[in-house]
Image (cartoon, grey):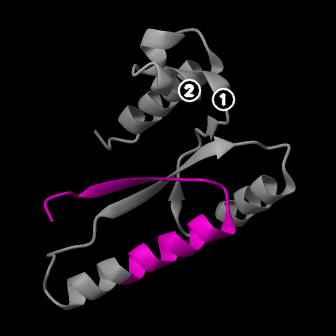
């Protein structure tokens, strides 16, 4: 209720896009019913992206033509991110120079540059 911004990590899949639509509907109903004073600004963060996959590329094209706010930064599919979680640490503690760490650095810059935080 207090949040003004929602960052929603999603996989590049049609299932995830349907869930985003469902969330938007729920937020609209909550607004209409008075449960919230305003809808939070929603940003989509693409996670586990593999742009070699046709489905991923199709979802990316769809999102480029949509009205949703989508971060330019994408978190690419990366085994180091999974390994860091298995070792109960973040990617910066596990492999700070990895591609996954670079993706998250780029995301943090984009979030700050957009004035979200």
Could you tell me if the residues under marks 1 and 2 are in contact, i.e. CB atoms within 8 Å?
yes
Q: Position of residue 105 (x, y in %)?
A: 49, 23
Quadrant (top left, top right, bottom left, bottom right) of the C terminus: top left
Residue 17 included in the magenta stretch of the image: yes
Q: Which residues are magenta?
A: 1-25
Local SS, label 2: helix
For the residues labelled 1 and 2, the Cα–Cα distance comes to: 6 Å
Residue 49 included in the magenta stretch of the image: no
Local SS, label 1: loop
- Residue 62: tell me if it is visible: yes
Q: Is residue 107 above or below residue 34?
A: above
Q: Name the residue nearer the viewer: 34 or 14.
A: 14
Q: Is residue 95 above or below residue 76?
A: above
How crowded is the residue under tag 1: few (<14 C-alpha within 10 Å), some, or many (20+)?
A: some
Q: Residue at x 53, y 47 (%)?
A: 71
Quadrant (top left, top right, bottom left, bottom right) of the N terminus: bottom left
Which of the 4 image quadrants contains residue 27? bottom left
36 sits to left or right of 105: left
Q: Which residue was labeled with disc 2?
A: 81
Q: Position of residue 4 (x, y in %)?
A: 23, 58
Q: Name the residue nearer the viewer: 48 or 71.
A: 48
State the residue lying farthest toward the front.
86
Q: Is residue 38 above or below residue 92?
A: below
Residue 78's disc is 1
State the residue lying farthest toward the bottom.
33
Q: Is residue 89 above or below residue 23?
A: above
Q: Residue at x 40, y 34 (%)?
A: 113
65 sits to left or right of 91: right
Which of the 4 image quadrants contains residue 116? top left
64 sits to left or right of 67: right
């Amino acid at each position: 209720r207090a949040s003004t911004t929602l960052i929603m990590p999603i996989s590049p899949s049609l299932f995830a896009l349907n869930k985003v639509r469902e969330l938007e509907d729920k937020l609209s109903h909550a607004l209409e019913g008075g449960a919230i004073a305003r809808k939070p600004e929603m940003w989509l963060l693409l996670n586990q992206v593999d742009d070699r996959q046709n489905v991923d590329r199709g979802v990316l094209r769809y999102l480029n033509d949509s009205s949703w706010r989508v971060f330019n930064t994408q978190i690419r599919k990366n085994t180091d991110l999974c390994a860091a979680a298995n070792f109960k640490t973040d990617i910066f503690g596990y492999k700070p120079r990895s591609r996954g760490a670079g993706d998250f650095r780029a995301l943090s810059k984009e979030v700050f540059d957009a004035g979200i935080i």
